[in-house]
Amino acid sequence: MPYRTCEIRAAKGSEAEKIHDYYQAKNDVNVLPRPLKDLRESAEKGLFFVAETNAALIAVSGVFDLGPIPYVELGGTFVDGIVRGFGIQELLFRLRIASVILNEGPEMGILTAVDPSNQASTHNAVKCGFNEWPNPVSELFEPCESCPKRQETQAKGRRCCCEFYILPEANARREVQNLLDAAASSCTIRRTHKETGENLVIEIRSQLLTENRALLVAFAAGEKW
Ligand SMILES: CC(C)(COP(=O)(O)OP(=O)(O)OC[C@H]1O[C@@H](n2cnc3c(N)ncnc32)[C@H](O)[C@@H]1OP(=O)(O)O)[C@@H](O)C(=O)NCCC(=O)NCCS
């Protein structure tokens, strides 16, 4: 069976415009448009990940600050149609969780928001340890005031078009361990598509799994700092 390849790495701040253009070109209804500034800040902190094949973007995914509240939001994931079904979103969840632990500290709250009709994303968020958060902090609803889906959302009797999910610390440790296990002997991960049987070889190029690996091992084992 032939195989394709891709590489996942943290984006640089200087790549924010390219990423912004990619989102605009894809214009996916499930991905909240984010200003260039937010993409740049996420990338500058080492919290934005891209997947590429032959230097062309095939997936993007970020972590975004939520102002004064001690939470970050995992969001902005888009995986190109040709590489869907290989579990790239799951890997991106785990890489972002690990990057928040190292870059923002283990105390930082980690949340995500998913439109309930997006079954694949809901499945992946729950699989990666997120629990439904029925009554989240009220600050999270502030962007709803200017959301393009506001009318549609209110007509459904909802406060926000998305459901919020929060990651308990024990699950963050488990997911970091899952990431370490997946890349235990090398940073090359092979995935087979459940329906087509096609293979994708994913190379993770990240300090998380090299220079910073020992810290992640300590976190997964229950250490605090
Ligand atoms: C949602 C998205 C990111 C998923 O990316 P992906 O890397 O292809 O994820 P996968 O399809 O490999 O996910 C695989 C898992 O989801 C499950 N899944 C896929 N479609 C599903 C569905 N309709 N209902 C339930 N589970 C589903 C698969 O069974 C698989 O589960 P498993 O790993 O436990 O076997 C991608 O489809 C995408 O970019 N969509 C458009 C933008 C978007 O929705 N972004 C997310 C915003 S929150």
Image (tube, rainbow, N blue to C red):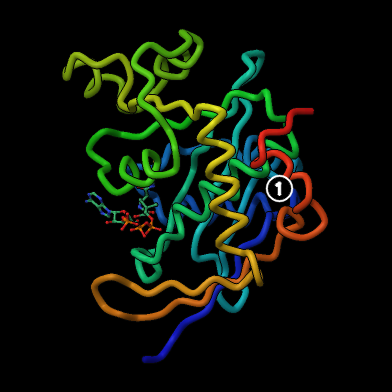
Quadrant hosting residue 1? bottom left
Q: Is residue 65 left or right of residue 191?
A: right
Front residue (pair 59, 176): 176
Quadrant hosting residue 63? top right
Front residue (pair 53, 24): 53
Quadrant hosting residue 62? top right
Q: Position of residue 218 (x, y in %)?
A: 73, 42
Vertical placement of 55 versus 106: above or below?
below
Vertical placement of 44 versus 169: above or below?
below
Residue at horizontal 60%, vertical 73%?
A: 188
Q: Quadrant of the C terminus?
A: top right
Q: Position of residue 38 (x, y in %)?
A: 63, 35
Residue at horizontal 64%, vertical 44%?
A: 98
Q: Is residue 68 left or right of residue 80?
A: right
Q: Which residue is mark 1?
A: 217
Q: Position of residue 49 (x, y in %)?
A: 61, 53
The amino acid sitting under disc 1 is Val
